[in-house]
């Protein structure tokens, strides 16, 4: 099912092909979590049973976790936050205890998932979920607002945030 999902993503998002081909080790989660990655375990992803409910769910979780992996590869070289940044940021989901890097990783996952669902909708797929796209748009914009209000971003974090801001003007909900 993972190979099928990756092939679907390559067909839907051909510009991501090289990123999707980066070697990633995928492990099965034995608890109730759906998916996770950890920057301390580079190029490794953990998926729970719920990630395999539908092919669309699996594709979204792959996009989500792969965006974290791809972004963390950059953060290893150019961190997104200043040294000693606080951990008092809250994600749009309500998850607290995050630092600016965590918010930026969340923002990047959200915009990647928005891109995925917009392509799915545009393709006319019956698997497209417009309500999920609306939620992810809101998540992206709220994460972006949190980043824009932060004074704890590194130069790289500021650059990525400014690019996300510029890109946000291209995001539309016309197909919703």
Image (spheres, helix red, strand yellow):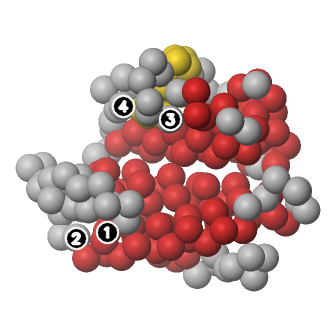
Instruction: Tell which tag, 2 or 3, sits nearer the viewer.
Output: 3
| Label 2 sits on residue | 150
Residue pictured at 69% horizontal, 79% vertical: 173
Q: Which mark is residue 147?
A: 1
**Mark 3 highlights which residue?**
34
Q: Position of residue 115 (x, y in %)?
A: 67, 60
Mark 4 Cα shell of 10 Å, populated few (<14), some (14-19), many (≥20):
some
Q: Which residue is mark 4?
A: 38
Q: CA distance from mark 2 to mark 3?
A: 29 Å
Q: Secondary structure at mark 4?
A: loop
Name the element at disc 1. Answer: helix
Quarter-of-image position of residue 174:
bottom right
Where is residue 171? Give x, y as percent: 64, 75
Disc number lying in front (3 or 4): 3
Are the residues tagged 1 and 4 within 8 Å (C-beta)? no
Q: Quadrant of the N terminus?
A: top right
Query: Of marks 1 and 4, which one's residue comes earlier in the chain?
Result: 4
Q: Nearer the viewer, mark 2 or mark 4?
A: 4
What is the distance, in whole Å, between disc 1 and disc 3 at their CAs?
A: 26 Å
Instruction: Residue 124: name its quadrant.
Output: bottom right
Residue contact at pointers 1 and 2, CB within 8 angstroms: yes
Query: Camera-side residue: 105 or 16?
Result: 105
Q: From the viewer's perspective, is the residue at label 1 or at label 3 nearer?
A: 3
Q: Is residue 88 left or right of residue 174?
A: left
Marks 1 and 2 sit apart, C-alpha to C-alpha, by 5 Å
Residue 72, picture quadrant: top left
Disc 3 crowd rating (10 Å Cα; few below 14, some 14-19, many 20+) is some
Q: Residue at x 28, y 46 (%)?
A: 79
């Amino acid at each position: 099912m993972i190979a099928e999902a990756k092939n679907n993503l390559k067909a839907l998002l051909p510009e991501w092909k090289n990123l999707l081909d980066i070697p990633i080790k995928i492990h099965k989660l034995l608890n109730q979590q759906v998916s996770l990655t950890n920057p301390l375990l580079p190029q490794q992803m953990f998926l729970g049973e719920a990630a395999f409910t539908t092919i669309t769910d699996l594709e979204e979780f792959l996009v989500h976790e792969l965006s974290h992996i791809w972004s963390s590869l950059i953060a290893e070289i150019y961190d997104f936050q200043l040294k000693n940044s606080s951990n008092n940021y809250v994600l749009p989901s309500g998850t607290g205890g995050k630092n600016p890097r965590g918010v930026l990783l969340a923002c990047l996952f959200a915009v990647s998932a928005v891109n995925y669902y917009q392509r799915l909708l545009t393709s006319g797929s019956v698997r497209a979920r417009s309500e999920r796209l609306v939620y992810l748009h809101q998540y992206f914009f709220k994460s972006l607002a949190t980043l824009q209000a932060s004074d704890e971003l590194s130069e790289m974090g500021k650059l990525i945030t400014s690019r996300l801001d510029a890109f946000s003007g291209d995001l539309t909900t016309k197909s919703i």
